[in-house]
Image (cartoon, rainbow, N blue to C red):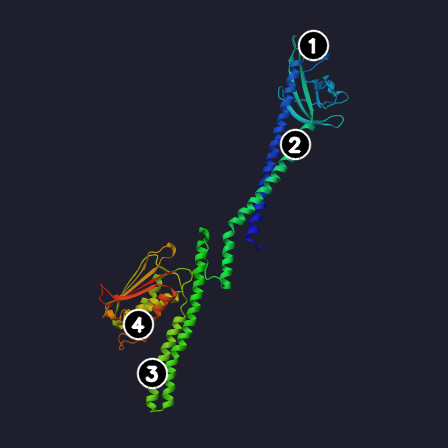
Amino acid sequence: MRSLNARLLLAATLTLAAFLGLTGFTLDQAFQRSALSATQDRLQGQVYMLLSAAQFEAPEKRMMPTSLPDPRLSTPSSGLYAQLTREDGTSVWRSLSMLGLSIPVERPTRMGVPILGTADASDGTPLFTLAFSVRWEGKRRNDERVYTVQVAESRQEYDNQVRAFRRSLSTWLAASAIVLLAVQALILHWGLRPLRRVAEEVREVESGRKESLIGDYPMELQRLVVNLNALIRNSKANLDRYRRALGDLAHSFKTPLAVMRSAADTGGRVEDLRETVREQVSRLDNTVQYQLQRAAASGRSALATPIPVEPVVGKVVQSLAKVYAERRLQFEVTVERGAEFFGDEGDLLEIVGNLGENASKWATRRVRMRASVGAGADRSRRPLELCIEDDGPGIPPDECGTIFERGYRADTAVPGHGIGLAIVRDLVYEVYHGELTADRSEDLGGARVRARITF
């Protein structure tokens, strides 16, 4: 069963059925106990009435008056019966209602304690019986007799009450179940409506009618909607980036190919032709490296597992320390606790590695790297702020805005292709929609590059 609404409704139905079944069983048992207790009270009242009317000093044949307070005892087959027996089971008196009937004699084991039981009359009628024994001391010494008063009542009234109660209880429980199930179905339909809206909006995004999920959703679905929108934006951004990379690569190839074609067509010295080819091939090589690194950027992911920044920065520093071991550079690293990167680890290595390598190229003795967590609306994904400084000659103010352009080199004597900072710019701006600035370090006096990466 793939429908979430049907699964929840089935679970609610089974739970409700179990609850109402248990409730019905409990109420039925309670009603039976209550009806049985009422029957015992009625029969005990009849016993006390007979004891009060009995004349134990009179001869046994006249111990009970002819007229009794309850007329049913004087009406044959009325459903209420009584008899008085001696200790040996001999009958002393029987009510007129027992005409033509006999009831098994029951003797309590304890004096003065009523015993409720069941029995069948001689005609098969099921009965409730209550037996009560008393010890009567006569006026003469050693004149002590034990009598048992036994009252019986037909079970028909009790059974009718139980059946009527069960019919009424079943009707009300069934009606309650139907109403509760209808209410539960409406609640589930209303409660799951946001999920259906999400599914509808996702289908609209797939069909191209929408670019993102824009509905107002409950708090429990907000994170899902945010992640889906981020996933949609990332997919679209990646596709756009691939298209731009291919377009830029094709456009970048036009000029070097045109120069080499022109040099081949015009002729000239072989040395000049070789120099032109080497120059344009080097240019093509730099272009291919730049576009490959740019296209290889994975980008941020809404569902990515956070990557601790400190181990990545540590790897970069270890590599730079080996590369520039002869210059004995001092690397100062400060990573704020809890700093995390929500994206591809390769992208973070590109950003930190290129910025660290650029600072190491220009540094005299010291390179400082800092990573901290910035302020953000979403506490679970706050921006990552990186700051890399060096004590080198620094960046002229008029060049702070151009050092991130592809192919730009502040000093051609320093090895490099001029694409490292351009890769950082593309990753920070286009992939992670962050900020990138360059100025002079106030503490070290050299260059300071700051990157703010948002998620």
Residue where numbered disc 3 is placed:
279
The residue sitting at 46% across, 55% down in the picture is: 215
* Foreground disc of the pair 1, 2: 2
Mark 2 residue type: Val
Mark 4 residue type: Val
Q: Is residue 442 above or below residue 266?
A: above
Q: Which label was assigned to residue 257?
A: none
Q: Nearer the viewer, residue 151 or 229?
A: 229
Q: Which label was assigned to residue 162?
A: 2
Q: Residues within 10 Å of mark 2 (few under 14, many from 20)?
A: some
User: What secondary structure is found at the residue carrying circle 2?
Assistant: helix
Measured in 3D between alpha carbons, the distance from the residue under mark 2 to the one under mark 4, in whole angstroms, is: 95 Å
Q: Residues within 10 Å of mark 3 (few under 14, many from 20)?
A: some
Q: Residues within 10 Å of mark 4 (few under 14, many from 20)?
A: few
Residue where numbered disc 1 is placed:
58
- Closer to the N terminus: mark 3 or mark 2? 2
- Closer to the N terminus: mark 2 or mark 4? 2
Is residue 448 something one can see in this rendering?
no
Residue 359 falls in which quadrant of the image?
A: bottom left
Mark 1 residue type: Ala
- Closer to the N terminus: mark 1 or mark 2? 1
The C terminus lies in which quarter of the figure? bottom left
Residue where numbered disc 4 is placed:
323
Q: Residues within 10 Å of mark 1 (few under 14, many from 20)?
A: few
* Foreground disc of the pair 4, 3: 3
User: What secondary structure is found at the residue carrying circle 4?
Assistant: helix
Mark 3 residue type: Glu
- Closer to the N terminus: mark 4 or mark 3? 3
User: What secondary structure is found at the residue carrying circle 3?
Assistant: helix
